[in-house]
Image (tube, rainbow, N blue to C red):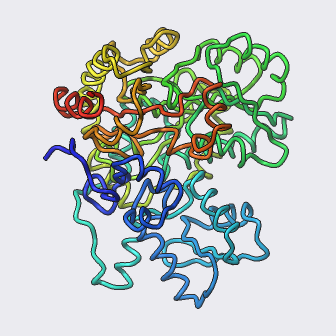
Amino acid sequence: MSLLREHPLGEPVPDTVHAVCVSLPKMADVIGYEERHPETMAAVKFGYPRFVFHDYVVKAANLAAKRHDVVGRAVYAVTSAAAAWALAEYVSADSHAILPEADFVMVHFPDTPEVRKQAKAFLQHTGGSISSRQAEDYLHAADHNFPIQEEDSFAGDEEAHVLGALRQYIDSKHLYIANCGMNAFYATIRAVSEMQRPRGKTLYLQLGWLYLDTQKVLSELLQSGDEVIVQLDVFDLEAIDQIFEEHGDKLAAVVTELPTNPLVQTPDFEHLSALCQKYDTVRIFDPSVAGIANVDALPFCDVLVTSLTKYAASQADVMIGAVAVNEGSVFADELAPAIRRLVEPPYPRDLARLAAQIDEMPQVVAQQNENAAKVVEYLEAHPAVGKVFHPKKSDSAKHFSELARTDASLGCIVTFELEKPLVDFYDKSTVVKGPSFGTDYTMMCPFLYLAHYDLVSNDFGRAYLKERGLNPELIRLSIGTEPFEEIQAALEAGLSD
């Protein structure tokens, strides 16, 4: 049955307790979700797993607290002792305790609003929480009446199968699977810091407006004394050159996305690579937006980090990521073992679930690319649509083509501005509405409302976004594998008068 229809508020998409997407069908629901309106949150039991503590994860933490006679504390179930210590170090609390429990680690703090805010932010940005499947198994072990979600799972060596599939696109012996893409990035930043700080390199260059949590790791989770320089215009080579001329001796790493999220811009990565090599600066590139099956970024960077929740896990029911170190990098011998040590591996059932669907990636990506080209043409000709952003647009086209694996490679992400009120389009369209992308079904979100509600919800923030080329009402569309005519009809329901 097609998912191109309206889904009730809070419905997981697909229909599984492990779905990474939850339906937010109306703009009022988006605002209610961001502002934590009780009536909205009562309907939203699940959400994008790093942004919302899954109901099972909360239950697992509460059960662990009960078993350890912990009362009146803020309790978290995290993946490892290392993750627990990192969380405890980040949270400003008078006290904390770290206790092993089953196959995870429980951390608890005084229960204050500030502690809860800090702990949630840290776990969101770093991927340190246990997964819903790990929580499910823990709860089932405690009570065999607790249900286990029925799903296809790979029978065999799931890690070998996933690595084999990934190595069709990522040619490196230094390839490590993480429990999510953000943990892959966080581990990489920590490894780079360990290597570069003794050399006096403590600056990081963020190139472009990047994914929210990537920006947060750079702005809030660097080691003490490390700093970030932000260059939003990825095409301003003069400004980039000047940054290297002034700070090159202290630049530890450059972080960018190929292409960026949400404007789908591809910088001149060859020019950037030459600068990095001149100044011994690590190149950290993230191709998640287009996906590793569409772009070949590893030859141009030292470290590639990517989310596999997108494209590889196209059924949208598992959080997972990967990081690869370029074997030819001058930093490989130092970075590879450090990243391997620091990354949080996926829970076995999550890895098995990815293994069960990763072989579909080539077919899914090919159909997404075909549909995306048609959707771009449709949107660019529509009177209700303003600017359309895609990888082959204007300044990005040349650079993207140099990364693209085929002429058809495009990726599933298209973002666009509207010539009509956002609420009219959003509420009437009949695609899935929620976070994430790279799924085999078409979905969309008012990206800046979900990623930067603190900015879109006030005049100052909206002006700040506009000054940086970001329309607060921007729509991010993730194109699926349905027949194009059905996707067009679902969008037209919102675009037509």
Horizontal and vertical percent position of residue 56: 41, 71
Left or right, 409 with reference to 98: left
Residue farthest to the front, as pictured:
497
Quarter-of-image position of residue 133: bottom left
Nearer-the-camera pick, 352 or 64: 64
Q: Quadrant of the C terminus?
A: top left
For the point 41% across and 26% down, the residue is: 418
Residue 405 shown left or right of residue 271 in the figure: left
The answer to whether residue 440 is visible is no
Residue 310: x, y in percent? 39, 40
Image coordinates of residue 185 in percent, x first then y, are 59, 43
The residue at the point 59 percent across, 75 percent down is 75
Residue 155 is left or right of residue 316, and the answer is left
Residue at horizontal 27 percent and vertical 60 percent from the top? 16
Q: Position of residue 183 (x, y in %)?
A: 56, 49
Q: Residue furthest bottom?
A: 69
